[in-house]
Amino acid sequence: MDDDTKITLIGTQLAREGLEFIFEKGAPECEKCKFKSTCLDLERGRKYRITGIRSDKVQECFVHEEGAYVVEVEMAPIVAIIESRNAVEGATIRYKAPNCETEDPAIYELCHPAGLKEGDKCIISKLFGPVEIDDEENLKKVELKLA
């Protein structure tokens, strides 16, 4: 397990490698759980990916009817649109949301990606290419990992 990996619990119906989710907060039922400190040790508003299932032993859970598994998670990469001049693979940047007004839900999601906050320090891990929005040609679609 590397430094970026965290341990948490997730419902048995959801627990599969590769599942990505945004952690928001624990349910009120979590307050009485003995695993609360492990389950809720994720950063609110961040996107995580399950990288491993620790055990197939079902743990009791007040939220998930069929219990939960202990899983390993890490912050998931996030696909976003940034200014082309900053889009260099391997570069470390401070995320700044582009000024893109659109009603296209797919493009809106790239302009305002879940799990990423203004000013986050990120590494550009992959370039996908240019994106044109309302004749604005200086934007590129990239994959970002929090640094």
Image (tube, rainbow, N blue to C red):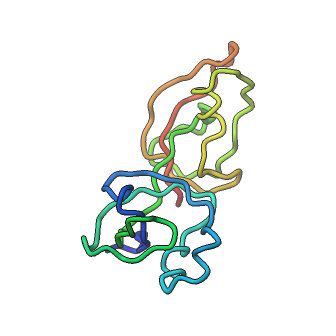
Q: Residue at x 46, y 65 (%)?
A: 64
Q: Among all residues in the image, which is located at the extreme left?
A: 56
What is the residue that sits farthest to the front in this orientation? 65
Q: Decide: is 142 above or below 32.
A: above
The residue nearer to you, when weighing 50 against 36, is 36
**Horizontal and vertical percent position of residue 52:** 29, 64
State left or right for residue 142 relative to residue 53.
right
Report the front residue among 86 and 26. Answer: 26
* Residue at the image point whose x is 35% and y is 73% from the top: 70
Where residue 56 sits, quadrant-wise, is bottom left
Q: Position of residue 31 (x, y in %)?
A: 61, 80
Residue 128 vs residue 146: left or right? Answer: left
Of residues 57 and 128, which is closer to you in this image? 57
Residue 23 appears at what percent x and percent y?
56, 60
* Residue at 42% from the left image edge and 40% from the top image edge: 126
At x 57%, y 75%, the residue is 30
Identify the image quadrant of residue 40.
Answer: bottom right
Residue 61: where, in percent of width, then height?
A: 45, 73
Q: Quadrant of residue 110?
A: top right
Left or right, residue 11 beside residue 80: left
